[in-house]
Image (tube, grey):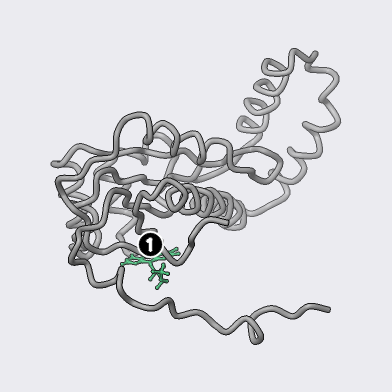
Amino acid sequence: MIDLNWRYATKGFDANAKINASDIQDLVEVIRLAPSSFGMQPFKILVISDQDIKLKLQAASYDQAQIGDCSHLIVFCIDKEVTSAHVDQYVDLICETRDMPKESLTGYKNSIAGFVNGKPAEVKLEWARQQAYLALGFLLYACAEKKIDACPMEGFVADAYDEILDLKDQGLTTCVLAAVGYRNEVDEGQFDAKVRKPVEQFADFI
Ligand SMILES: Cc1cc2nc3c(=O)[nH]c(=O)nc-3n(C[C@H](O)[C@H](O)[C@H](O)COP(=O)(O)O)c2cc1C
């Protein structure tokens, strides 16, 4: 079992410590391989190491220093509106990946399309958000395994992010962030005891 007491939401990163390219690729793969409802993956990520962009984003994140000091900022962007076109693309990808004829998936495609077309836009946005958060959880766990520090973050102004990152034209909007890198040795959070509900209040075994 991974030492989850080692990980904490890191506020003080060592701005000079950078994650190597191979570890970044591994983290991207963890996010890509996370499960999602129907397998639709209604989100994508931006992995940002450009310091100028990070500083612009820090200003749009209530000036939280993690953004500028982390090695890489991972921005989870969700599809603003999931449509039949997304379902078609997904079913095409299944057919291509598994070398299957499209007709064999007509029933499956219709059932996903029924789900997608039967929901109001805000419900689909929330559904997309849930998929991104699940992948965020995978990322945090993988970071702990690799002894890479991370801070999950939702303290930012989504509209400003969408503007800075030019997401509007791509039909995307910012959902949640993870700053990743290495803690600095004086960051106090690493010495704090974990505050969690006691297991007897938290889990019922029935
Ligand atoms: C979805 C989410 C959003 C968060 N947003 C922020 C944030 O914007 N800034 C921050 O410093 N911490 C943020 N946190 C960190 C939490 O405050 C932290 O995970 C919580 O207090 C538990 O502490 P631990 O992660 O150190 O165990 C966020 C955590 C989660 C899961």
Question: Which residue corresponds to the image point at 77% horizontal and 31% vertical from the top-left?
Answer: 109
Question: Where is residue 127 shown, x and y percent of the image?
Answer: 61, 54
Which is more toward the observer, 18 or 62? 18
Question: Which residue corresponds to the image point at 41% horizontal and 31% vertical from the top-left?
Answer: 25
| Ligand 1, image quadrant it occupies | bottom left
Vertical position of residue 119 compared to residue 41: above or below = below
Q: Secondary structure at mark 1?
A: loop
Question: Where is residue 51 shown, x and y percent of the image?
Answer: 15, 41
The quadrant in which the N terminus is found is: bottom right
Vertical position of residue 199 compared to residue 126: above or below = below
Question: Where is residue 161 shown, x and y percent of the image?
Answer: 29, 49
Which is more toward the observer, 140 or 160? 140
Which is more toward the observer, 70 or 97? 70
The quadrant in which the C terminus is found is: bottom right
Vertical position of residue 101 compared to residue 195: above or below = above
Q: Sort mark 1 into few (<14), some (14-19) or many (20+) by Cα contacts within 10 Å.
A: few
Question: Which residue corresponds to the image point at 20% horizontal and 46% vertical from the top-left?
Answer: 54
Q: Is residue 165 left or right of residue 32?
A: left
Question: Where is residue 61 shown, x and y percent of the image?
Answer: 25, 60
Q: Which residue is mark 1?
A: 154
Q: Is residue 172 left or right of residue 129?
A: left
Q: Quadrant of residue 13?
A: bottom left
Q: Is mark 1 within 8 Å of ligand 1?
A: yes
Which is more toward the observer, 151 or 19? 19
Amino acid, disc 1: Glu
Q: Is residue 7 left or right of residue 136?
A: left
Question: Which residue corresponds to the image point at 52% horizontal and 56% vertical from the top-left?
Answer: 2
